[in-house]
């Protein structure tokens, strides 16, 4: 069995192992070297944030049993998409596919901030009153479903190979957990690392209650799109320890930290 076949066959196991492994490593790092003092009970936040993750996983499996990989296989078998028409070498299609999917995630993120009805969904991610590894995985189920449908369209239009999809998903999820970590990096390391990867200090600016800061640093994985499109902000005005996390108007932990409240956030007339 070659590597590509092995990865494709064991996709679910690989994704789950990556998720649990990176979650554990970042969580341990948060205990050893936290960046900020948390305001809300970690037990409450973790229990409810991860409950939302499990709910989303259940809904996706129920609605889309084959997931994005199944769509990529179908597109490949039927010759759909730009890459399938061009018949590019696999290494080229892999690199281009990863870059274009990351750019699409950036563009989708910008869209979900600037279209009011989509912001109502996306603000579930932002109303978390603290910022740690579990924040990177808490999204409203409707946003998760819409994101999956957008991904399906992108795969069909570009002809993204199944293996590219399998590689991209753990990279994206792992990067999201890393850059949402409440972890401290040496300033010099952060300065150089954010040239090639979104760091926690870079993305944390995006979770500020100040809207000009909320509407910056949209990248989840690669930092280049923010610099290219003028949405990059190096540091929050109040500093990393002084900045306030969340969305103005959402200060009640029952609304922001407990699962029923999170599910109802898009339907509230504030924020």
Image (cartoon, helix red, strand yellow):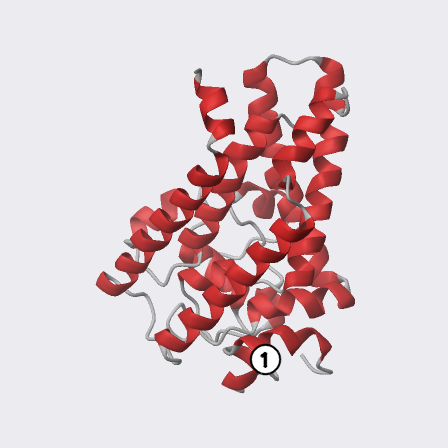
- Position of residue 209 in the picture relative to residue 142 (left or right): left
- Position of residue 110 in the picture relative to residue 30 (left or right): right
Q: What number of labels is visible?
A: 1
Q: Quadrant of the N terminus?
A: top left
Frontmost residue, 70 versus 202:
70
Q: Tell me residue 43's x, y (percent).
A: 36, 75
Frontmost residue, 211 versus 55:
55
Q: Is residue 105 above or below residue 123?
A: above
Name the residue rendered at 26%, 58% in the picture.
Answer: 28
Residue labelled with disc 1: 261
Q: Is residue 138 visible?
A: no
Name the residue rendered at 68%, 66% in the picture.
Answer: 121
Q: Tell me residue 255's x, y (percent).
A: 57, 82
Check the image and name the residue furthest to the left: 32
Element at label 1: helix
Q: Quadrant of residue 33?
A: bottom left
Name the residue rendered at 48%, 52% in the picture.
Answer: 176
Q: Is residue 135 above or below residue 230?
A: below
Name the residue rendered at 47%, 72% in the picture.
Answer: 48
Q: Is residue 84 above or below residue 218?
A: above
């Amino acid at each position: 069995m070659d590597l590509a076949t092995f990865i494709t066959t064991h996709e679910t196991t690989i994704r789950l192992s990556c998720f649990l492994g990176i979650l554990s490593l970042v969580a341990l790092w948060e205990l050893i070297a936290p960046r900020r003092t948390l305001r809300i009970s970690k037990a409450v936040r973790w229990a409810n944030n991860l409950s939302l993750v499990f709910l989303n996983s259940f809904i996706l499996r129920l609605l889309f049993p084959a997931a994005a990989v199944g769509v990529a296989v179908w597109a490949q078998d039927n010759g759909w998409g730009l890459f399938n028409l061009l018949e590019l070498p696999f290494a080229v299609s892999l690199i281009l596919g990863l870059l274009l999917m990351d750019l699409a995630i950036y563009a989708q993120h910008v869209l979900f901030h600037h279209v009011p009805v989509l912001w109502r969904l996306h603000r579930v991610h932002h109303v978390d009153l603290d910022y740690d590894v579990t924040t990177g995985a808490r999204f409203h189920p409707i946003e998760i479903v819409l994101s999956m449908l957008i991904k399906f369209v992108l795969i069909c239009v570009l002809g993204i190979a199944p293996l590219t999809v399998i590689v991209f998903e753990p990279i994206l999820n792992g990067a999201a957990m890393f850059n949402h970590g409440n972890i401290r990096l040496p300033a010099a390391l952060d300065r150089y690392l954010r040239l090639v990867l979104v760091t926690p200090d870079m993305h944390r600016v995006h979770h500020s209650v100040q809207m000009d800061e909320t509407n910056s640093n949209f990248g989840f994985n690669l930092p280049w799109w923010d610099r290219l499109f003028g949405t990059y902000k190096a540091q929050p005005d109040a500093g990393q320890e002084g900045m306030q996390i969340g969305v103005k108007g959402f200060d009640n932990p029952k609304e922001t930290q407990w699962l029923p409240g999170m599910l109802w956030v898009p339907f509230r007339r504030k924020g």
